[in-house]
Amino acid sequence: MFGRLFKPTTVAHAHCDIPCGIYDPTAAKVAADTVAKMVEKIGALQPGATDFTTRGNFVRMIAVKEEHAQICKKELEILWSDYFKPEHLEKFPKLHDTFWKAAKLCSKNKQNVDAAAAAELQAAVKEISDMFYATKK
């Protein structure tokens, strides 16, 4: 009896499980920028340094890079699956391919320390951000 009272009549899907309508690519951009900054900082470390401070910084920079690559992927997947609709795909035929490639770049940046891959991720997030804001006009 009580199950009927609490059973929803409509199922809603959103990034926070409440259809709040709040979507923004800024978190993905900040995460991609953080990945690029960590790659830059890692590249600036003294090669072959064995002191504990440098080694500790290296480990933390790797952890931050990987964490933010995952954050970027999560934020992009929320936009891809919850925000963009079929009418957006009509306007942006490369939408799915762009998101798929961006998600792959997130993984590549988790696995490697590669300035070119970090720059590609930033460019992909910018392209997605541009599509997002174009839908808001």
Image: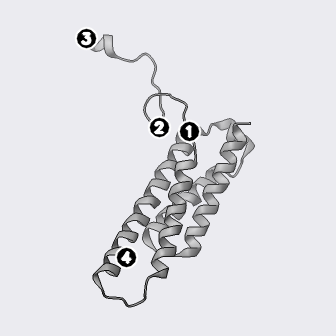
**The quadrant where residue 55 appears:** bottom left
**Vertical side of 60 occupied by 82: above or below:** above
**Vertical side of 3 occupied by 61: above or below:** below
Residue at disc 4, secondary structure: helix
Q: Please give the label number shown on residue 23.
A: 1
**Vertical side of 24 occupied by 46: above or below:** below
Residue at disc 2, secondary structure: loop
Crowdedness of circle 4 by 10 Å Cα count: few (<14), some, many (20+)? some
Residue shown at 51% from the left, 28% from the top: 20
Spatial distance from mark 2 to mark 3, Cα to Cα?
A: 28 Å
Spatial distance from mark 4 to mark 1, Cα to Cα?
A: 34 Å
Residue at disc 3, secondary structure: helix
* Nearer-N-terminus badge (2/1): 2
Query: Which part of the image, by quadrant, shows the C terminus?
Result: top right
Residue topped by disc 2: 15
Residue 78 x/y as whole percent: 50, 44
Residue reaching furthest to the bottom: 48
Q: On the rendered structure, is 39 left or right of 93?
A: left
Q: Do the residues labelled 4 and 3 touch (CB within 8 Å)?
A: no
Residue shown at 46% from the left, 61% from the top: 69
* Nearer-N-terminus badge (4/2): 2
Q: On the rendered structure, is 120 left or right of 87?
A: left
Residue 39 x/y as whole percent: 49, 73
Spatial distance from mark 4 to mark 2, Cα to Cα?
A: 33 Å
Residue at disc 1, secondary structure: loop
Residue 105 x/y as whole percent: 54, 64
Q: Are marks 3 and 1 in contact (CB under 8 Å)?
A: no
* Nearer-N-terminus badge (2/3): 3
